[in-house]
Amino acid sequence: MRGTMPVVATVAAGVIGVAAGTWPSVRAQAAGGEEGPSMRTQLASVLQDQQWAKPKPGSWKPPRPAPDGLPPVISRIDTQEKVVFLTIDDGYEYDPEFVNLVRKERVPIMTYLTTRYVKGQGQYFWAMRNAGSVMENHTVNHLNMALQPPEKQKQEICEASDTIAQQYGRRPQVFRPPFGSMNETTRKMAKECGIKSIMLWSAEFYNGTTGPGVGFNGFARGDGGKGFKPGDIVLMHYRKGLAEQFRTILGWIEQQGFRAAAVENYLPKSLGGNAPDKPPASPAKP
């Protein structure tokens, strides 16, 4: 059935993902009563979903559905909190140290996965999933969507969602078009593939590459400003040296008095996130 996985397959793949990400190995308890956590306990610890802080009531305005009923396009979150959202695209480089860093520092991220880049490294993204990253859709072949006919756009989005659902146990709800290129056809095809919202970005960290006007490992805002703003959605990519690059941006975030937050907790369920569609109001002042 689409979007589900047998329990045995899920557990097996999860253990593979742990090894690929250089996690502590999971070992069965030896006959004769060797001390230590049981296999069941260790697997529960390894495979459980991460729980990230939710926004304070009244501190944010959730994105709204589009009037035309198609997936809305989101590029930032309207919030008063000094939070930013780290999103990472593609998936053609695999840095095991990055998996350990995300787990150790407990940093929420969202991955937009281009499924042809996964190649034989699907277990790496199992490790990323288990470290707390949601796996969302970035097409099969990283094509410019605005240049593709409707049937090709639908194929690119639907097949990527099918692959991610089969491998990682959850069908993507959010889509990011490669290069940020899209048109109304993209929104229509995304909806037909089960996508609930389309996420772009408000700032980019050119990690491991050179950005226009900002140099190597530069940071640029879409509005031309400097530094972070509350609710920024930051674009990054899976590239060589990602762990060290990630430490760099975490340092910038901390220096400016911000923190990384889980964007899915600021997206209503109707748009593919975890937040209620009608968030609670802020507490009444005494």
Image: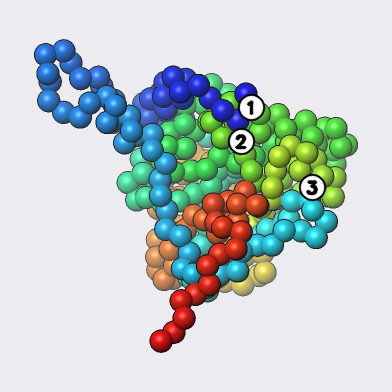
Between circles 2 and 3, the one closer to the viewer is: 2
Using a 10 Å C-alpha cutoff, classify the residue at mark 3 as few (fewer than 14 neighbours), some (14 to 19) or many (20 or more).
many
Residue occupied by mark 1: 2
> Going by the image, does 209 lie left or right of 54?
right
Place of residue 1 in the rendered image (x, y in percent of width and height, measured from the top left): 62, 24
Place of residue 16 in the rendered image (x, y in percent of width and height, measured from the top left): 41, 23
For the residues labelled 3 and 1, the Cα–Cα distance comes to 21 Å
Residue occupied by mark 2: 171
Residue shown at 76% from the left, 58% from the top = 66
Of the numbered discs 2 and 1, the one sitting upstream in the chain is 1
Residue shown at 71% from the left, 39% from the top = 194
| Amino acid bearing label 1 | Arg
Residue occupied by mark 3: 187
Q: Residue extending furthest right? A: 149
Of the numbered discs 2 and 3, the one sitting upstream in the chain is 2
Using a 10 Å C-alpha cutoff, classify the residue at mark 2 as few (fewer than 14 neighbours), some (14 to 19) or many (20 or more).
many
Place of residue 219 in the rendered image (x, y in percent of width and height, measured from the top left): 56, 61
- The answer to whether mark 2 and mark 3 are in CB contact below 8 A is no
